[in-house]
Image (cartoon, rainbow, N blue to C red):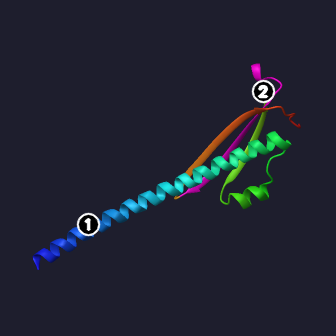
Amino acid sequence: MTEIIVALTVLGLLLAGLGVSLAGSARFNRYQLTRQQCIAAAQAQIESIAATGQPVPNQEVTRLWPGLTVSIKETPGAGQWQGLTLVEVTALGKTYGKNVEIRLSRYLELTIDK
């Protein structure tokens, strides 16, 4: 009887450890998925602006990457970058209460409408 109780206790501890490990792995994977989605959304915005001069419409961003917020900031280049426009795209997501923020930037030949 003692051997059965010890074996069940050890088995229970192993299963509890496995459960904690799987939960941690799931959290990490979800964070990485959100991070990849933020990178994809930011890259898509920059590529769209470079190709067409216009960002991806907000409806499409919401459809393709639900739960993400994407903002774009354009500033004129200075110094050796004068004549170009610095496009900064910030993508924000949230997973398990943790914020994910990806910021990408690129100089493009654009005119800023004021």
> Does residue 86 sit above or below 70 in this rendering?
above
Q: Looking at the image, which residue sits at the far left? A: 2
Residue 101 among magenta residues: no
Q: Distance between the residues labelled 2 and 1?
A: 60 Å
- The circle drawn on residue 100 is none
User: At label 1, which amino acid type do we have?
Assistant: Leu
Tell me if 48 is positioned left or right of 68 in this view.
Answer: right
Residue 91 among magenta residues: yes
- The circle drawn on residue 13 is 1
Tell me if 71 is positioned left or right of 12 in this view.
Answer: right
Label 1 sits on a secondary structure element that is helix
Label 2 sits on a secondary structure element that is loop
> Does residue 11 sit above or below 92 in this rendering?
below
Image spot of residue 24 (x, y percent) = 42, 58
Q: Is the magenta stretch mostly helix, strand or loop?
A: strand
**Rendered residue at 52%/59% (across/down):** 96
Tell me if 33 is positioned left or right of 59 in this view.
Answer: left
Question: Which-is-in-front pick, marks 2 and 1?
Answer: 1
Q: In which quarter of the image is the C terminus?
A: top right
Image quadrant where residue 49 sits: top right
Which residues make up the magenta segment?
79-95
Image spot of residue 30 (x, y percent) = 53, 57
Q: Quadrant of the N terminus?
A: bottom left
> Does residue 24 sit above or below 87 in this rendering?
below
**Rendered residue at 83%/25% (across/down):** 83
User: At label 2, which amino acid type do we have?
Assistant: Gly
Q: Are there few (<14), some (14-19), or many (20+) residues within 10 Å of tag 2? A: some
**Rendered residue at 80%/47% (across/down):** 55
Q: Looking at the image, which residue sits at the far front? A: 51
- How many marks the image carries: the answer is 2
Earlier-in-chain disc, 2 versus 1:
1
Residue underneath mark 2: 77
